Amino acid sequence: MKNNTIIELDNVNFNYGHTAVLEDISLKVENGEFWALIGPNGSGKSTLINIILGLLKPDSGTVKLFGVELDSFKHRELIGYVSQKSNSFNSGFPATVLEVVRSGLTRKRGLFKRFSKNEELKAIEALKIVGMDHFSGRNIGELSGGQQQRVFIARALAGEPELLVMDEPTVGIDQQNVSSFYSMLNDLNRDHGIAILLVTHEIDLVTDLATHVACLNRTIHFHGIQSDYKRMNDEKISKWYGHPVRRVHQHELGAEE
Ligand code: ADP
């Protein structure tokens, strides 16, 4: 399905009871873009993602996916979703990495159909993209949080989505592996043309990778290209974030080299 606009939100409002959680949200994600959706805890990020995934209905406003109104949208397989809770299998969980990735294909075919060779190759291809093909026979529970998260991304990729939605994907990943995880996402976006919507409360790291940034705290306080986000001063960012923040600048990161 080729449509340049993947997500289009227009004046979306959402309340839990009498509490307004999302107010007047308008946002457009185009083909091939990498968006970081940033906001503090409780700012409405998960609610917004649930609306995009069709799990919650907005009280007003319109949501279009791939140019089609949410109510009529039938091509859920175009959207791959990786939640922050994915990477928490314990060591006894009885499934191999390949089985987990192949389960990303079952939705289309019914749970008990046998996989064709072609589909197995697709699963291996997806594992290659995330750098995990040599782990295909290992038990999922034996992998680290970061490795499991890569496998869950491969699982989402096996369904050949055009958009990958991720909710705080670095939770549970060791700090020293976070940057290689992010650079894998960068390759995914740049080399494979997959649009990404990544939700995070981190105001620094991801914005070096994302092509676009949206700052959410009940309403959208800023949305635009990465360089404009970087040019914004910390004071302005602190204002929408709700408490003082100071971003780490690129030259400070390189200071120890
Ligand atoms: P975030 O993902 O940015 O942490 P959420 O979308 O989870 O934010 O929550 C936004 C607001 O909605 C918070 O104030 C939260 O307490 C409230 N909220 C979330 N889920 C529910 C619910 N099921 N019922 C009532 N309020 C909720």
Image (cartoon, helix red, strand yellow):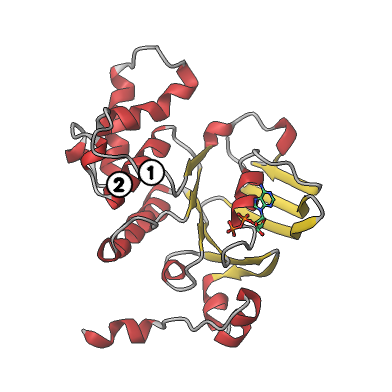
Taking the spot 32% from the left edge, 38% from the top edge, the residue there is 126
Quarter of the view holding residue 243: bottom right
Label 1 crowd bin: few (<14), some (14–19), many (20+), radius 10 Å = many
Q: Is residue 227 above or below residue 108?
A: below
Ligand 1 contact, mark 2 (Cβ < 8 Å): no
Q: Is residue 21 visible?
A: yes
Q: Residue 4: image x %, image y %?
A: 61, 48
- Extreme residue toward the top, this view: 113
Is residue 233 something one can see in this rendering? no
Assess disc 2: are there few (<14), some (14-19) or many (≥20) residues with their C-alpha within 10 Å of its C-alpha. Answer: many
- The label on residue 153 is 1
Residue at 64% from the left image edge and 58% from the top image edge: 44
Residue at 47%, 64% in the rendered image: 210
* Amino acid type indicated by mark 2: Val
Work out how far the residue at label 1 is from the one at label 2, CA to CA, in angstroms: 7 Å
Task: Classify the position of ligand 1 by quadrant: top left, top right, bottom left or bottom right.
Answer: bottom right
Where does label 2 land, which residue? Answer: 130
